[in-house]
Image: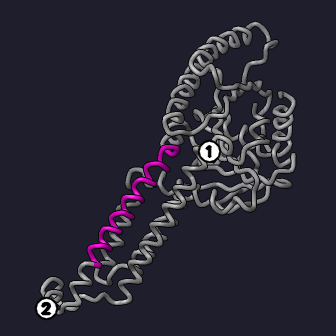
């Protein structure tokens, strides 16, 4: 299942409950794809920065090479929000009249801690990565934050697209109203009464309006492209990673329900850290308990393919550990 998705998709999202091994599974999958000749970008949206810990090296917001055909980057929420707000405030300072610049700064500072700001900033950065990386990479692998955060993130493109569309429509309505005023302004007596002066707009004001329109259209295109990528089942798949335990199983069922609601295709389930079948009486009881939880999973999500990986005796670290995990993915097909 996993090997097929690695070979036949362009965008893979790995998600699930915290602590189940999403980063390990996504990194090993990315490494396997790179070994097979695909140019791969591995992207972490998880604030915990586990990707750098796993590869035992520093990974930042710009792509760094980790192995032949494999690069990675980490999207830091705080840095992303700072960059996002700086871009917006810079544009607003340039576009708004001088006497409103103080209000712009005040609004931006209040926006920094607004609910949903980190998600919106991360989403726009993901859309930007998707937009710019298409020519350089064959496969994008996203290692996402725990389930609740990711479910909200997957629903955002639709909402942000609708919100941006609404802004654009309001701008268009304002443009039509402005054109009426401009025509009225050709009659100096009427124009002066309505506008309190010359009805003709300066070229600088028209430039400002054009720039605002350009920024809104750029955001609309980015969110539209991301929404289309998420909805394209031939191109994109979401893989849910879980442990064979009660809470991860229940959370997986709920996450799948939310993904279906937002139109995101789930490619399959990866059950990680399974107790080996021949590990003594104590662990045999533990494995029997796992089977009970996995029956619940199978009854709730009977159509999703599933792949299990055994609990390793040691922590998986560095390229050598990931190479072994990649081998297991390949051999299990």
In which quadrant of the rendered image does the N terminus lie? top right
Q: Is residue 39 left or right of residue 46?
A: right
Give the quadrant of residue 150: top right
User: Element at badge 1?
Assistant: loop
The image's mark for residue 86 is none
Q: Mark 2 to mark 1: distance in Å?
A: 57 Å
Which numbered mark, 2 or 1, is in the foreground of this view? 2
The image shows residue 289 at horizontal and vertical percentages of: 64, 11
Near-viewer residue (210 or 290): 210
The image shows residue 47, relative to residue 277, as above or below, that is: below
The image shows residue 273 at horizontal and vertical percentages of: 72, 26
Residue 157 in the magenta stretch? The answer is yes
Neighbours of disc 1 within 10 Å: few (<14), some (14-19), many (20+): some
Residue drawn at (74%, 24%) of the image: 308
User: Element at badge 2?
Assistant: helix
Neighbours of disc 2 within 10 Å: few (<14), some (14-19), many (20+): few
Near-viewer residue (99 or 197): 197
Examine the residues drawn in magenta and state their main secondary structure: helix
The image shows residue 145, relative to residue 174, as above or below, that is: above
Near-viewer residue (51 or 32): 32
The image shows residue 128 at horizontal and vertical percentages of: 59, 61
Residue drawn at (80%, 54%) of the image: 39
Q: Is residue 114 left or right of residue 297?
A: left
Please give the range of residues in magenta. Answer: 153-179
Q: Name the residue under label 2.
A: 189
Q: In this view, does 38 lie to the left or right of 143?
A: right
Q: Is residue 15 left or right of residue 81?
A: right
Q: Name the residue under label 1.
A: 232
Give the quadrant of residue 173: bottom left
Near-viewer residue (289 or 56): 289
Residue drawn at (33%, 69%) of the image: 106
Residue drawn at (38%, 83%) of the image: 206
């Amino acid at each position: 299942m996993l090997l097929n998705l690695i070979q036949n998709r362009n965008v893979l999202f790995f998600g699930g409950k915290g602590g189940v091994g999403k980063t390990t599974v996504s990194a090993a999958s990315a490494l396997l794809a790179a070994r097979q000749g695909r140019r791969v970008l591995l992207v972490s949206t998880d604030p915990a920065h586990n990707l750098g810990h796993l590869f035992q090296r520093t990974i930042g917001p710009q792509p760094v090479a980790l192995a032949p055909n494999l690069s990675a980057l980490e999207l830091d929420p705080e840095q992303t929000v700072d960059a996002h707000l700086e871009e917006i405030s810079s544009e607003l300072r340039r576009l708004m009249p001088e006497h409103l610049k103080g209000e712009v700064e005040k609004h931006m500072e209040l926006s920094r801690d607004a609910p949903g700001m980190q998600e919106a900033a991360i989403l726009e950065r993901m859309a930007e990565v998707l937009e710019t990386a298409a020519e350089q990479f064959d496969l994008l692998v996203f290692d996402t934050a725990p389930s609740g955060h990711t479910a909200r993130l997957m629903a955002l493109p639709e909402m942000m697209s609708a919100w941006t569309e609404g802004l654009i429509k309001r701008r268009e309505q304002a443009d039509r109203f402005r054109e009426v005023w401009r025509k009225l302004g050709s009659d100096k007596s009427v124009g002066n009464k309505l506008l309190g002066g010359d009805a003709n707009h300066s070229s600088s004001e028209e430039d400002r309006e054009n720039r605002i329109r350009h920024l809104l259209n750029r955001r609309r295109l980015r969110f539209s492209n991301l929404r289309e990528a998420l909805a394209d089942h031939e191109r994109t798949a979401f893989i849910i990673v879980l442990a064979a335990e009660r809470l991860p199983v229940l959370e997986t069922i709920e996450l799948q329900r939310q993904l279906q609601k937002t139109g995101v295709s789930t490619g399959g389930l990866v059950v990680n850290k399974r107790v080996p079948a021949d590990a003594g009486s104590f662990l045999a009881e533990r494995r029997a308990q796992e089977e009970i939880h996995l029956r619940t999973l199978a009854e709730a999500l009977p159509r999703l393919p599933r792949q299990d990986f055994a609990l390793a005796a040691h922590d998986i670290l560095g390229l050598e550990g990931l190479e072994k995990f990649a081998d297991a993915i390949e051999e299990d097909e």
